[in-house]
Amino acid sequence: MLKFNIRGENVEVTDSIRDYVVKRINKLQKFFEDSVEATAHVNLKVYPNRTYKVEVTIPLPYLTLRAEETSNDMYGSVDLVTDKLERQIRKYKTKINRKSREKGFKNLEFVPSDDDSASTDNLKIVRTKQIALKPMDPEEAVLQMDMLGHDFFIFQDAETNGTSIVYRRRDGRYGLIEAE
């Protein structure tokens, strides 16, 4: 069951916008088991040039879904983000189903994907981000990572001045990678 945390920047989140976001994102629940409980963090922004940006993050126990889209229409941005999240889920579940068949697991049951499985093999970089590394200690980096809802966080170690990465392990604890 999805809970919603809808926030607006430079825009008032009206009941009609809230209802539309909830209605569209709830359509993704058909991909999850009934026992999955998660909070969908939705951020709506309006820029001075009258474009609307919608960001959605859904942290799940086994995966974090995140998508953002910008367009000239708030409702259109919500539609685009929902479509992008659905593609992410289908791609992930296709990979899981393929791996479970290869290894002989029978307990993994996901909704089958209609997408062509060849598209998951086409790995290409579609977005590049540049970040400014802030000096901090690993504990602060873990807090930053958790606040962002990410599985890893790159930072400059304040003690060694080297680049380091903290990440969330599958067992729920944290790991640290230090560059030499």
Image (spheres, rainbow, N blue to C red):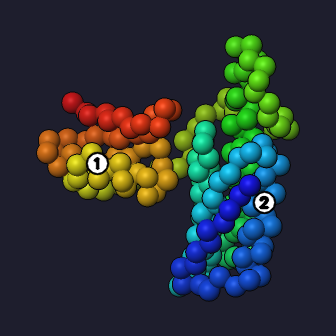
- Say if residue 11 shows up in the picture: yes
Q: Residue at x 68, y 51 (%)?
A: 37
Give the number of callouts. Answer: 2
Of residues 13 and 1, the one nearer the viewer is 1
Amino acid under label 1?
A: Glu
The image shows residue 155 at horizontal and vertical percentages of: 29, 48
- Where disc 2 sits, the SS reads helix
The residue singled out by tag 2 in the image is: 26
Question: In screen coordinates, is 155 left or right of 109?
Answer: left
Q: Residue at x 68, y 37 (%)?
A: 92
Amino acid under label 2?
A: Asn
Q: Residues within 10 Å of mark 1 (few under 14, many from 20)?
A: few
- Say if residue 69 shows up in the picture: no
Task: Indicate the quadrant containing the C terminus: top left, top right, bottom left or bottom right.
Answer: top left
Q: Of the residues under marks 2 and 1, which one precedes in the sequence?
A: 2
Q: CA distance from mark 2 to mark 1?
A: 35 Å
Question: In screen coordinates, is 99 left or right of 169?
Answer: right
Of residues 179 and 101, the one nearer the viewer is 101
Q: Say which mark, if any, is on residue 139.
A: 1
